[in-house]
Image (cartoon, rainbow, N blue to C red):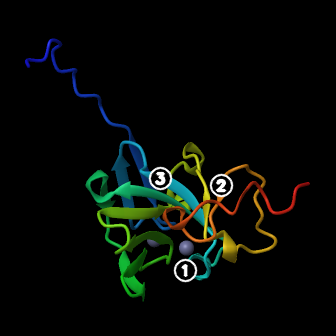
Amino acid sequence: MPKSSPPSAPEKAKTTRGRCLCRTIEYAFTGEPLWTAHCHCESCRRATSSAFATYVGVGLDQFHYLKGEPTGYVSSPGVTRYFCPKCGSPLAFVGDRWPGEIHLYAGSLDNPDAIEPRGHVHAAEQLRWADLHDELPRYATLSKDGSPIRRGPKTKA
Ligand SMILES: [Zn+2]
Ligand SMILES: [Zn+2]
């Protein structure tokens, strides 16, 4: 059946940019993230030397480096973590369990406030003192591995 309406003019996709601390590496992705989440697992904690890591998952087809190339470190089988070889900023995570995706660290975005975290993963490994007061779902491991163990913080004020 022929389409009755003419194809809409291609919308200019939104571009989101990020960079490392020293600006050796800059990246951009177009469109909306596939997902966003805080990860409380020990590996992400150590890789970022932070209480938890906030990720922005995007498709590799949405993503490109504008400047520089990060160094990859295979942190466990099928998982590569990317960082700036000059300043050391952690920038991205690529894992075999997420084919076709790259997971960017929200802290490396030009404007981290522009994204909206949707949940907490690996909440079973969450630090006692890193208990965020949002009402988002908390998953013991990953959202694809089961229902949330709770919504909202462990300790209600
Ligand atoms: Zn750098
Ligand atoms: Zn993690």
Query: Can you identify the residue that label 2 sits on?
Result: 137
Relative depth, front residue between 153 and 86: 153
Q: Position of residue 15 (x, y in %)?
A: 37, 43
- Tag count: 3
Farthest top residue?
A: 4
Compared with 80, 25 (above or below) is above
Residue at 60 percent of width and 76 percent of height: 41
Q: Quadrant of the N terminus?
A: top left
Label 2 – label 3 distance at C-alpha: 14 Å
Q: Amino acid at mark 1?
A: Ala
Query: Can you identify the residue that label 1 sits on?
Result: 47
Q: Position of residue 53 (x, y in %)?
A: 59, 68
Label 1 – label 2 distance at C-alpha: 24 Å
Compared with 3, 69 (above or below) is below
Q: For the residue carrying disc 2, how many other residues have a C-alpha within 10 Å: few (<14), some (14-19), or many (20+)?
A: many
Query: Can you identify the residue that label 3 sits on?
Result: 35
Q: Quadrant of the C terminus?
A: bottom right
Label 1 – label 3 distance at C-alpha: 20 Å
